[in-house]
Amino acid sequence: MAKLIAIEWDANEARVIVGRSRGKELAIDDAFGVAVPRDAVAGDEASVGQALAAELRRRGHGKADALVGVGRASIELRKIQLPPAPDAELPDMVRFQAMRQFTTIGDDWPLDFVPLASTETAVEVLAATLSPQIVAQLKAVCAACDLSPKRLLLRPFSAASLLIRSNPEDRRVRLVLDLLASDADLFVIADGSVAFMRTVRIPSLDAGEAVRAAALLGETRRTIAAAQSQLGGRRIEAISVFGDADRHRDLLDHFQKQLELPIDCADPFALVDASFEWRAEPPENSGRFAPLLGMLIDEVRDGRHAIDFLSPRKRPVPKSARERYLAYTALAIAAGCLFALLVKFQLDRENRIIGELTAELKSLKTNVDAVKKRESHFKQVEQFA
């Protein structure tokens, strides 16, 4: 069974899920959080890597492929309008347009995108880019943990995939809240994809649920207003909060009093189907692990992710002339072999006919010799007579 480790972190905590794939099924061996050292500063990935590596060793987890999540705050994101074009040409068109529209982007920056809508006159995509420095920092954390980075994924897309897979028939425009210790990812799902996202700072857990709920309510209203303008006037129809309903009871009650929208809690570990096998105790604050579960399930089921900065969409590589010439050569050789076989078949047939005629001629010669001998005897008798 292939071993996979999904990891992501923020300023307060690193989160890890260790799993194994068996075909298209997923078994979870472990899930845990690791506190980020308080003396770590932004960009100090070495301390994060050391803390993660120590906990992985303590729990007996060795080398594995890593799926790494990155938050909205680390990337630059834009909606891009393009003229209609074949799918193979979209990667080049998106990069060309991104170089003009993005604030900071270089030729060596990884760029990936997800199509949003397509009409006869335009194609709309959501493009995301990430600086090479951040990619290097994320790889450094993996190296410290003896992990091989396989994917570099955008956190909200992975969390959204988990929610969409759990109920594919639900086509409502939905706002989703993924609450971390001092941050929150807010993203909108429309037509089976993430159409809008933002990451906001919220009061820490020490401030109390009432203070956090009030701050989140304000950010939620701003997100709803911004998302509806991006969605052409379409309205948010429902709200989901990742986590346990009992843990977020105050938040749910506060939102239901202030917003005229249905709201529910979605426990990530209750969203997966029967192919999911759990081998460890569910972690505390289970809602924070939604992106990691989404990463693992997407990887196991079909290996496709909406945004992957390590394997972004690219124009298909055309076959080289060498391959074409080799194909022509092989075709010529095959044609020559076929011609040789046909010639050999014809020669064998002619030789068989010659052999048959030679045998027939030999038989006829024997008969002629016998007739001549009898004729000689007849002449001798006739002379005697």
Image (cartoon, helix red, strand yellow):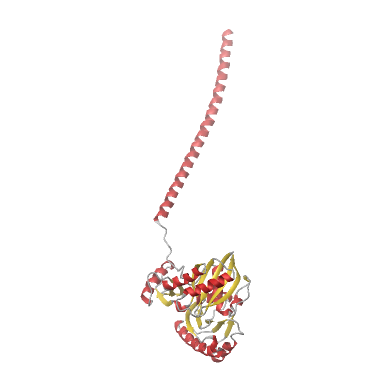
Which residue is pictured at 56% across the width and 82% down the height? 241
In this rendered view, identify the residue nearer to me: 356 or 234. Answer: 234
Quarter of the image for the C terminus: give it: top right
In this rendered view, identify the residue nearer to me: 384 or 242. Answer: 242
Q: Position of residue 164 (x, y in %)?
A: 55, 76
Determine the image quadrant of residue 100: bottom left
Quarter of the image for the N terminus: give it: bottom right
Q: Position of residue 278 (x, y in %)?
A: 63, 72
Q: Which residue reaches farthest left?
A: 100
Is residue 283 positioned above or below 300 on the image? below
135 horizontally vs 360: left or right = left
Q: How many numbered marks are there?
A: 0
Q: Which residue reaches farthest top?
A: 384
Q: Is residue 3 visible?
A: yes
In this rendered view, identify the residue nearer to me: 198 or 144. Answer: 144
Which residue is pictured at 55% across the width and 68% down the height? 4
